[in-house]
Every structure is written in structure tokens, then in C-alpha cells.
Image: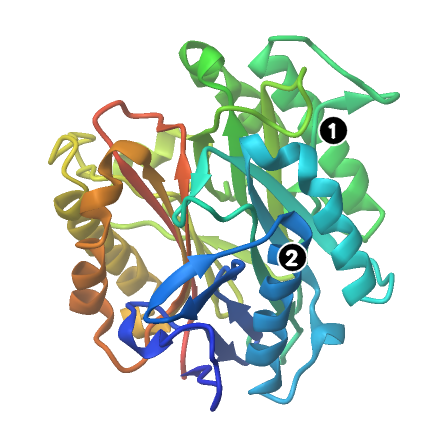
Amino acid sequence: MSAIEPASYPWLDYRKYAFALGRKTPAGLFLSGATGSEYIDGAVVTRGGMADQARLAWDKIARVLDAEGKSLSDITRVAEYVPIHALEQYGEAIDVRTEILDGREICVNTIPVKALLRPDSLIEIEANTDIAAEGISKGVVHLPTILPLKKGEICYPGDVVGQTARIFEVAEEMLLAMGLDLSHVVQTIDYLLPSVRRDYRGAGQPRFDALGPVYPGAAGIMQPGLLHPDAVVQYDITATRDVLERIRVPGWDRYDGLSYSAGVKAGKLVFGSGFGALNCATGESFHDYDIVAQADMIYASIQTMLAVAGAKMSDVVHTLEFVESQTLDAYKGVADVRRKYFGSKVLPAATGVVCEGILKRSFVIEIVPIAVISA
């Protein structure tokens, strides 16, 4: 497995950063999020409206794919992160995607966020080219972003528990159509409104009812708005065709009573939960509001979880970092933490976005890893 390094990438001197533009693996390519920013006159700037920025992001994605002999026709899934203030313009990005992909339908996850790391950016696009590979993966299945809809209407207004239950009903219908069911789910990321934070714990029950026996990796992230004004939660769900194995870290018994696992092994892939600066054995939190110290503790926990699965930090192919806005100035220090754990030769692909909040009030960063275990 290797980092993807295009010979020419005029928009950014990517070798200066603590992430790779993408990672090549036997299970496909994992790309970092791409925005409409570019390097002009010694500075990284973002220009134009939604359509302009989306088009430039797609140009970047195409360049990274081309470095591995792939094209846009190989993409199987994209995640599009859109600041809440830019959602009204999102239709322009959809039109660009439809044009770029020649109308080909792929899985799309659309995530409203508080902001992107570059404040003038209106969209960040992350792409995958998932493939089945003998001895590695029988196939990864991404579901499009799911809202709690029934007959075109949002169910259970204001009720995060009811809406969560409905989302899993919809997900099961989708999976059954592909010859799978909810027992194949390896990772869920749900986005919720701050207004239902107090009731969110109760949403664990519909997860217990719907998922398992191997509970997936999971993250729950607060955002200022969602894709539908009446939704209080939305889900992105990943499943695989492999037999699932819950990664049980000795001493991390707290996960035995939760509706999610620290990580799940599916073939040679590992899907982690969202990690915070938590002692995973005792549940005690550390480093209140210190993003660099929290990131260090998080990556140490990820390293511990991966070791139990038979993986190394060099096997991490993608990280998704959710950051609170008040710590953005200090966030650049997380780059040194990443180099500490990953080295500087083969870094993972990465996407980082600004969220409304992490569920634990003293946490300012949460990180979701994916790894492919090397031979």
C-alpha cells in the first residue's frame, strides 16, 4: 500500500502537509477531501461560487486518480461536505457532479457542516473507488445519506429516538435489496442537531434493536443544520459482505454495554469508531479543550485498537477529523501529532471539517479511522 503522489499537482504543495492526497490499497483508493482552493502568488486562496469550486475539486480528484491509472468512472462513492450557509447553492454542485460523471449514479453522502477548514470554501469532496479483492474484502457497500422519511415526510418531528429507529428501517430496506441486512453494517456516522443532545443517549436503544450481533464502529457529531429542516438526525452507513469481527481491546470493557464497538474487522479492513480523548478503560476524559493533547491521546487509542486487530498505524488509509471552531487556530499543531504516529513517508488520506460540537462538552476533536491490514 502506498501514498498517491501525482507528478504534477499545481494547486498545492501537498508534500508539506501531514496527509496524503490519497492511499492506494488492494481494496481500492481512498482520497482526501478536495476543495476549490488553489496556490496563487505564494498563498492558498479560494475563489468563485459553488459551481466553480466544485469543478476545481473534481479536477483535483481526477488528477489523483490518474496518478494510479484510474479515472472518474472508477469512483463508487463520494462524501460532499457543505457549510450550512452554502446549502442553498448545493444544487450547483449536484449539477457539476452529474456533468462530470456523465450522469452515472454513485453513492453520495451529503453532510452539512458548520464550516470547512478554509473559511471561503463552499464544498469539500472526498472520493472512494471501492473494489472487492480476494483475501482482502468481499466488497464494501456505502448507503447514501439517510433521513427519517416515510412517504416523503419526516417522521417523529423533534424526536431523535423515533427518527433514529426510522432511519434503520430505511437502511434495512436498502440493504435487503442488495442481498444484505443490518448485521453487515460496519460503521455508522450520524449527524444531529444540538437541540436533541440531551435526548441522544436514548437513541442507543433503536441501535441495539436494529444492529448486531457485531455492533459497528460509530460516531455521533453535532452540526448546526441537516439536509432536511425537520430532521434532527441523519445517518451515513457503511456495510460489507465480509464476516464481521468485533475488536475487543483488553480492559476496554465499557464497549460491552454500548451499541457500538471501538472497531470492527471485516476481511482485512478495519472500521473504527469516532475516538475522543477518553481513557477507553475507565471512561475518564482528559485534556479539556486542548486540541493537540486530545489528538495525541486519540491517536494513541487508535494505535492500541489497531494492534489488537493485527494492524499498524501505517495501515491507516483514511482519517476523518471533526474539529470545533474555537480551536481552529491551534489545530495546525495536530499535524505534528499525525507525523508522530504515522511518520512522514506514507501518511493516510484525511478529511477535516468544522462541526457544531462534539457530544462530550470538553472534547474539541473526534477522529474516525479506517485501515487496511497489510500482509
Percent position of residue 218, x then y: 46, 40
Tag 2 or tag 1, which sits nearer the N-term? 2
Residue 217 vertical placement versus 197 (above, below): below
Please tell me which residue is depicted at 51% across the width and 24% down the height of the picture. 192
Total numbered labels placed on residues in the image:
2
Q: At numbered mark 1, what does the secondary structure look like: helix, strand or loop? A: helix
Position of residue 313 in the picture relative to residue 176 (left or right): left
Residue 240 in view in this figure: no
Pointers 1 and 2 in contact (C-beta within 8 Å) = no
Q: At numbered mark 2, what does the secondary structure look like: helix, strand or loop? A: helix
Please tell me which residue is depicted at 66% across the width and 73% down the height of the picture. 131
Position of the N terminus by quadrant: bottom left
The quarter of the displayed image where residue 18 is located: bottom left
Name the colouring of the figure.
rainbow
State the mark number for residue 52: 2
**Which residue is identified by label 1?**
169
Density class for disc 2 (Cα within 10 Å; few <14, some 14-19, many ≥20) is some
Percent position of residue 323, x then y: 33, 40
